[in-house]
Amino acid sequence: MKSSTKLFIFISLLSVSLWAARGPAHKSLRAYSMGNAHVAVVDDKEAIYYNYAGLSQINRLGNFSFRPQQGYYPRQYFNARVNIGGAGPFMALMDSYKTINDIQNLYNQASRDAKKSGISTYDALIDSLAKHPEHTKTLNAYDQVLLNLIAKFDAELAFRNFGGAIWVDANLAPYIDTGLLMPYLGIDTLYVDAVAQAGVAYAFTDQFSLGLGLKILKRQSVSVFKLDAFNYSAIEDTLNLRYKDAKKDIFNFSTFSLGTDIGALFQITRETRIGASIRDIFFKSINGESIAPNLTLGVNYSPRLFNKNTSFARKVNLAMDFEDALNNERNYKFFNHLNFGGEIEQTLLGWLGVNNEIRALKGRFAAGFKGGYPTAGLGLELLRILEVEVATWAEERGYYLGQLPNRFYMGQVRIGF
């Protein structure tokens, strides 16, 4: 395998969010599919990431003592899961990679022609491009379009009043610029977050609970760079050096950051609860950048009319969050902070007359709006062991809402109990 191909694969496998100055962003597909409005939902392991106070809710569904109105819902004693997921326009990426290779071959041929004919490389390249106009047409379709790649891995354990996770989130955002003469490949964002976190919850009453957690973050990033046929060799050497430096830096504990999360949850009525969390309170900068804590307030409504308490149980949640309220860069744009959505979870295959401890097949559909952009997602769970999820959402990269939306499509496979 050529060294250029190895580097391309290495870069493609490293992927992460477009907000380098923000705290670690775990991508929960259940939450993202319903607009990422989840700080007051948190009825399972997602409490680890959104609101530790929600750990007090685990083992309430399916438990008559705590929630008799849903006593037949599959009882959730604990969550122990391993998740692997990824996203990216892989066909478009491979097409663009082929185009870059074609252009590089064109440049190499122009260099050889220039030596033979005694003309400049510039003139030879102009002649070559004139003979192959199809390259210009192909490149225009990809001009400045981000080819987002995301990879994630999670290992999670949660039971009543305790939860922890080790997870990795990575994002790569390459793009092609046609340029005035020679197109080039640019890397808009490239970083990897590795996080270990754990926390506890304490229910002071049946209605009110608090949560507290700690997290350790390790972030590896690569600065923005451009790659074209003129500087390919230099960039290849630079990437090799950065890769070696990154391997040496993995266990450099001075670059680890320690942070804390705090959350609260209050059940107003049997159907309505409110939640609040302040996450990513880091005690030192990350890669030299200060991280603003993420203060989020939310409400969840679970209408009794639509919930179903039988062997074919149904659960419905409608939620709304005001997210990242302390982010001054977005405070003047209200809808960037507003998330709302809903989900419906339905047991599709159960056993009549049984307390449904073993659920054969469950489906989940969700939709909403995250920061002003629509979201949606589907999930299918088999025997409470294997689950497949897909979700889509968008994030704003520009100065104002609607300027530069960046849409993600992600899939995930989850194994565990």
Image (cartoon, rainbow, N blue to C red):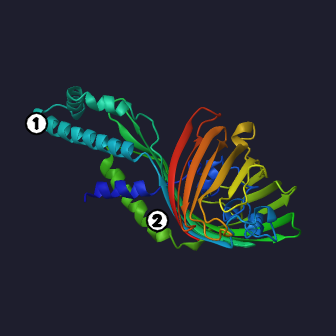
Look at label 1 and name its amino acid.
Lys
Q: Residue drawn at (87%, 67%), measured in percent from left and top?
A: 206
Pointer 2 residue: 246
- Quarter holding the N terminus? bottom left
- Is residue 13 toward the left or the right of residue 332 in the image? left
SS class, disc 2:
helix
SS class, disc 1:
helix
* In the foreground, 350 or 287: 350
Q: Position of residue 111 (x, y in %)?
A: 19, 39
* In the foreground, 70 or 351: 351
Pointer 1 residue: 116
Say above or below: 179 vs 9: above
Hey, which residue is sitting farthest left in the picture? 116
Rendered image: mark on residue 231: none
- Quarter holding the C terminus? bottom right
Q: Is residue 392 among the parts visible in the rendering? A: yes
- Is residue 296 toward the left or the right of residue 33 in the image? right
